[in-house]
Image (cartoon, rainbow, N blue to C red):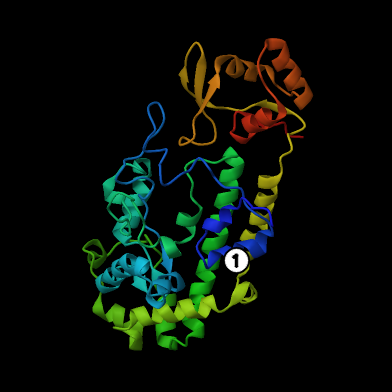
Amino acid sequence: MSPVVDDALEAMPPLYRPWVRAVLEGPVPRERRATCDECPMVRAEPPAVGFRADTRCCTFHPELPNFLVGAFFRELRPELLPGRRLLEAKIRARVGVTPLGIDRPPVYALTFRHGRAAFGSAQALRCPYYLEGERHSCGVWHAREATCATWFCKHERGRVGRAFWEALRHFLQAVDRDLARACVVELGLPSAQLAALAEAPAPGVGLEAGELDGRVDPARWDALWGEHKFGEHRFFAACHELVEGLGWEGVEARLGGDARLRRAVLRDSYGRLVDKAVPEAVEPAPVQLVKLGRKAAVVQGYSPFDLLELPRPLFDLLGELEGATPERALAVAEEAGVELDRRALRALVDFGLLRPVEG
């Protein structure tokens, strides 16, 4: 019997999963503390940052490339019906909808950019694909995009884990852009439609009256969609069919320079993620002290969503580790009567309480 592999990629969307495996050529450790079924951010108590139970981390509007939208119009399984209905409503509303995919409305993009501090707590930012009910499920989970597939509130390896998932997100976003553009070209959109897409203003560069009111100029819609007007869902389905049939070699052949650069960064980040070595020497890193008590200290290292509670003796010891080798750090801890092993030392580095000595 083959051993069971603990691989976070098992939970990736079906299209993304084989692409990422082809790039990494190895499993990815699961983020076991970021449990959506029992959200740790909803259960968080002060001084930790917490999320609202009716928003969670879903205070984000995904940007769905055409081929991911199309998954809901090709695969007619009952569990995809809620997502299909939400996407149909988006297409009818037209705002943010082009042959390249379904983007966030300009007003939402503006609000999100200036309301990042309200992440996790503002209902006005809640995702339009969020499904009400006890399970707090996502209507587009089956074909969620790069951000939703790679964001975690907590990471087993702290900033090392976050850096890996951010690198994966940037890579998948670049792949999404390249494949969405490949779809509109390879499915034979006329040059006039391609020109209309190419001339579209960058998101967030000024807002016209119609965009503020949630309206789309009919002439603009006609120019974008041409003969696919009223058949937008069929076009999206064709995009999904095209991309699904490519395989990784076909996807790779369509990648531009940005995606290839992001792939190199991703591979480097993956190497760091699976490397369990302790730095040759460490020093204290700047941290935010959240709470200090006689027995324990609560500190923020790499993330406000992932606070650490340290025994007070261990917290006090950090300042004594300036330039310490692992052996010296463990010896200092033993002299002070503080429990510390190499694994815990590496965790202090991972979570940003210590950092490698440069040079």
> Vertically, is 341 above or below 205?
above
**Residue 255 appears at what percent x and percent y?**
60, 71
Q: Amino acid at mark 1?
A: Pro
Residue at x 29%, y 69% (from the top left corner): 85
Q: Is residue 304 visible?
A: yes
Horizontal side of 239 relative to 211 (left or right) equals right
**Residue 290 appears at what percent x and percent y?**
46, 23
Horizontal side of 161 relative to 141 (left or right) equals right
Q: Nearer the viewer, residue 207 or 164?
A: 164
**Residue 227 appears at what percent x and percent y?**
34, 89
Q: Which residue is mark 1?
A: 18
Q: Nearer the viewer, residue 94 or 206?
A: 94
**Residue 76 appears at what percent x and percent y?**
37, 75
- Other residues around mark 1 within 10 Å, as few (<14) / some (14–19) / many (≥20): some
All told, the count of numbered labels is: 1
Residue at x 53%, y 43% (from the top left corner): 32
- Extreme residue toward the front, this view: 1
